[in-house]
Amino acid sequence: MSTPTVNDLAELREHLTRPDGTTVLALPGDPGYAVATPWNVAKTVTPQAVVLAETAEDISRTVAFATDQGLRVAVQCTGHGATGLTAQDVEKADVLLVHTGRMNDVQIDPQTRTARLGAGVIWQQVIEAAAPYGLAPIVGSAPGVGAVGFLTGGGIGPLSRTYGLASDLVRAFELVTGNGELRRVTATENPELFWGLRGGKATLGIVTAVELELLPLSGFYGGAIYLDAGDAEVTGRVLHAWRAWSLNLPEHANTSIAIFQLPPLPAVPPPLAGRMTVGIRYTSTAPEPEAAELFAPMRALGTPLIDAVGPMPFAAIGAVHADPVDPMPVAEEATLLSELPTEAVDEILRVTGPGSGSVQLVAEIRRLGGVLAKEPEHADAFSHREAGYSFFAAGVLAPEIAAIVKPQAQAMTAALARWSTGGFMPNFSSDLTAAERVSSYDESTRKRLADLADSYDPAGTFRVGQVVRH
Ligand SMILES: Cc1cc2nc3c(=O)[nH]c(=O)nc-3n(C[C@H](O)[C@H](O)[C@H](O)COP(=O)(O)OP(=O)(O)OC[C@H]3O[C@@H](n4cnc5c(N)ncnc54)[C@H](O)[C@@H]3O)c2cc1C
């Protein structure tokens, strides 16, 4: 494929120029191009051009132009799941990046309990817009993540055991497919695309808007307690107790446990900075006395450095995981576990606990199951409902440890291989190679997605980034 030159893109620039002469096409060096810098700044994203899309038509025109010219189109919102895209990489030299950040309109309809989101909306906006009506979306651990990127990967979060995958609540997508056509996608209109968009990431095209059911939920009981993890015996006791406790939780309860090594930065609470700590996260939608009683055994494990578990407004959902907000260079590694026997906890302690030599910022286990494990109302392309737990490690690529972060995290998932399902959630697959990414889907889902991509994008315009193709 040929690399487009500034001249080749003149026609596209014309399509993307407003009556007042301003354009939403940014070439390297133009103001606006830098918006492509992703949240995960370890990923280099330097495409041939960035389209700062403001409307679905901007996206349609870009895709139609690219298909006509034999170029490819990738999509990015916040860059929390950026896969890396550089014009220096010959394989990726012909890529235009659609950036959706300007399509950030949120509309709430309290009567139908639905939200309509533009492709550039982040969860925090939806949380804030829905809260005055006592409504809430199902979100992940970090409200700064893009809603559409999250939903196209299924989306698990602090309430998944209670309400299922976030994408189970999608009622409609608007989607630009490979020929530039804008289609409405629901359970009854283009149902095969409705199946594939809930799990298939950008394989089938670029989503321009989503309609989403909201939950009548204004608050929850939960948060996190943090304990010192300096002592191996104490940390072992905590992890094993959490394992046994988390095994048979009711569906109204959700939990994860994480070993942290947080740096002494202003954003980090002083009791947690510069030491190894263990955080037990919890949410419950049960009435406060019942929810508090269920969590009591975790509270009894020791004197916490911080106890921030209690009745919370839904707007505080981000505090449960307290994920980093500011952009940073990170490497991630994840695996799904079918079960978590005591031997698996011993392995986790050996590779991530006190004395392990771990340099990871966080190593966490989330309890899955509950409603998440049940078949959704409409079948989808998410293949991992049966997993009982997820393991995730993330490290900051600071110069002094950059070389060991990723191999060490890989050694951690290798240590858990005996209990792994062998699969990866699409939302935690951005750091994988194309060959590894195959495991984001079971074989029949992968084939069906690739077949659909062949029929809706025969020119291969979207054959870049986190997509599934033959
Ligand atoms: C700190 C942190 C916490 C996270 N927590 C969770 C969590 O709790 N649960 C969870 O499930 N995931 C979680 N993730 C993963 C996150 O959901 C994915 O990385 C998601 O893809 C991010 O979407 P984005 O738009 O913000 O990122 P981007 O990097 O902008 O997009 C990532 C990918 O999403 C797809 N995509 C984005 N926009 C569109 C579109 N308009 N049309 C079609 N496809 C699109 C594309 O494949 C794109 O490459 C977390 C990630 C981070 C960094």
Image (spheres, helix red, strand yellow):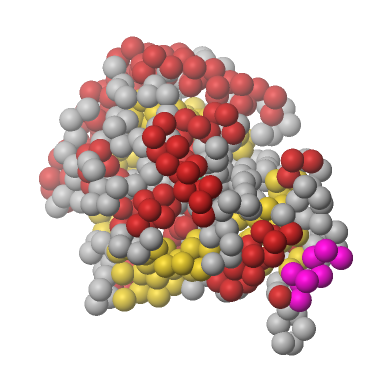
Q: Position of residue 336 (x, y in %)?
A: 39, 29
| Of residues 420 and 441, the one drawn nearer to the viewer in this rendering | 441
| Of residues 381 and 2, the one drawn nearer to the viewer in this rendering | 2
Q: Position of residue 420 (x, y in %)?
A: 39, 21
Q: Is residue 212 visible?
A: no
Image quadrant assignment for residue 361: top right
Q: Position of residue 375 (x, y in %)?
A: 23, 43
Q: Count how many numbered circles sit on residues in the image.
A: 0
Task: Give the position of the C terminus as an image quadrant.
Answer: top right
From the image, give the main secondary structure of the stretch colored magenta.
helix
Q: Which residues are magenta?
A: 7-14
Does residue 305 belong to the magenta stretch?
Answer: no
Does residue 12 belong to the magenta stretch?
Answer: yes
Residue visible at 83% across and 63% down in the picture: 8
Q: Is residue 273 left or right of residue 117?
A: right
Q: Is residue 134 visible?
A: yes
Q: Is residue 79 left or right of residue 210?
A: right
Q: Residue furthest bottom?
A: 20
Residue visible at 47% across and 30% down in the picture: 439
Residue 218 vertical placement versus 411 (above, below): below
Residue 235 vertical placement versus 73 (above, below): above
Q: Position of residue 134 (x, y in %)?
A: 26, 69
Residue 211 vertical placement versus 74 (above, below): below
Residue visible at 71% across and 82% down in the picture: 18
